[in-house]
Image (cartoon, rainbow, N blue to C red):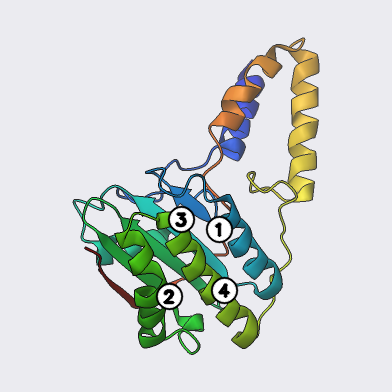
């Protein structure tokens, strides 16, 4: 029984993942995280970001929230970027767009590796031309889509990079192939000696996981641009 308890604890640790990235900053579960519903799921935007990643390695993300309070949008965007780890480690080629609908504020946080092609002046100009006018008339989806599409086009045309090989065969479980094999072996062994009772606990153990998308571990360079819409 002592050994069974130890193995169960080990399995819980394997499958568990933090449910927050620190403080009150959100986990980005995918390229688009919309807590307000204004993007209607954002599937096409998500596909755009995925395409950019698949062809350049740069990780773009969109986050829409009702409010960033008690933090200002600068702190909120920076910390969310940092704690999720957008972009590749060592390349720092991530980009995060944050919209706060209650405060009418937007912010783009850019990783240091993309600063050369996406300086604040260029990003700000595109935001004022493509993003802000559409948001001001209530068309969040078109504004975000056009903005991300243009930023992604710049990355594809001007950024020299490629995606790293993903070590995780199952995206939402941060385990390599051989780690999955070991875990599967343990589960099979436990199902035999417990006469299948361990299987009742698996949904709980797996449900404790899912700490968000496996971002590359990049960092923000502290640069970016933001503003307010009417």
Q: Which of marks 3 and 2 is nearer the N terminus?
A: 2
Residue at position x 74%, y 65% from top? 165
Frontmost of labels 4 and 3 is 3
Quote the CA–CA distance across marks 1 and 4: 10 Å
Mark 3 vs 1: CB contact within 8 A? yes
Q: Mark 3 = which residue?
A: 141
Mark 1 vs 4: CB contact within 8 A? no
SS for callout 1 = helix
Quote the CA–CA distance across marks 3 and 2: 21 Å
Q: Mark 1 = which residue?
A: 45
Measured along the vertical axis of the image, is residue 20 above or below residue 132?
above
Quote the CA–CA distance across marks 4 and 3: 16 Å
Q: Residue 110 carries which label?
A: 2
Mark 1 vs 2: CB contact within 8 A? no
SS for callout 3 = helix
Please tell me how crowded label 1 is: few (under 14), some (14-19), or many (20+) other residues with Cα within 10 Å: many
Q: Which of marks 3 and 1 is nearer the N terminus?
A: 1
Residue at position x 41%, y 59% from top? 83
């Amino acid at each position: 029984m002592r050994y069974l308890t130890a193995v169960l604890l080990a399995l819980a640790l394997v499958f568990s993942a933090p449910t927050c990235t620190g403080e009150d900053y959100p986990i980005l579960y995918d390229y688009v995280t919309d807590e307000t519903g204004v993007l209607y799921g954002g599937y096409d935007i998500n596909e755009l970001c995925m395409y950019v990643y698949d062809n350049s390695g740069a990780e773009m993300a969109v986050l829409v929230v009702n409010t960033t309070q008690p933090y200002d949008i600068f702190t909120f965007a920076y910390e969310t970027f940092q704690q999720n780890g957008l972009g590749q480690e060592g390349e720092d080629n991530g980009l995060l767009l944050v919209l706060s609908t209650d405060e009418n504020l937007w912010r783009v946080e850019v990783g240091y590796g993309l600063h050369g092609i996406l300086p604040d002046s260029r990003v700000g100009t595109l935001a004022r031309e493509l993003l802000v006018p559409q948001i001001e008339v209530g068309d969040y989806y078109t504004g975000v889509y056009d903005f991300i599409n243009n930023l992604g086009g710049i990355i594809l045309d001007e950024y020299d990079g490629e995606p790293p090989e993903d070590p995780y065969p199952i995206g939402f479980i941060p385990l390599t192939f051989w780690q999955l094999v070991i875990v599967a072996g343990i589960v099979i062994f436990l199902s035999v000696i417990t006469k299948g009772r361990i299987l009742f606990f698996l949904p709980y153990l797996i449900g404790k996981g899912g700490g968000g998308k496996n971002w590359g571990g990049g960092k923000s360079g502290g640069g970016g641009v933001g503003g307010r819409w009417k």
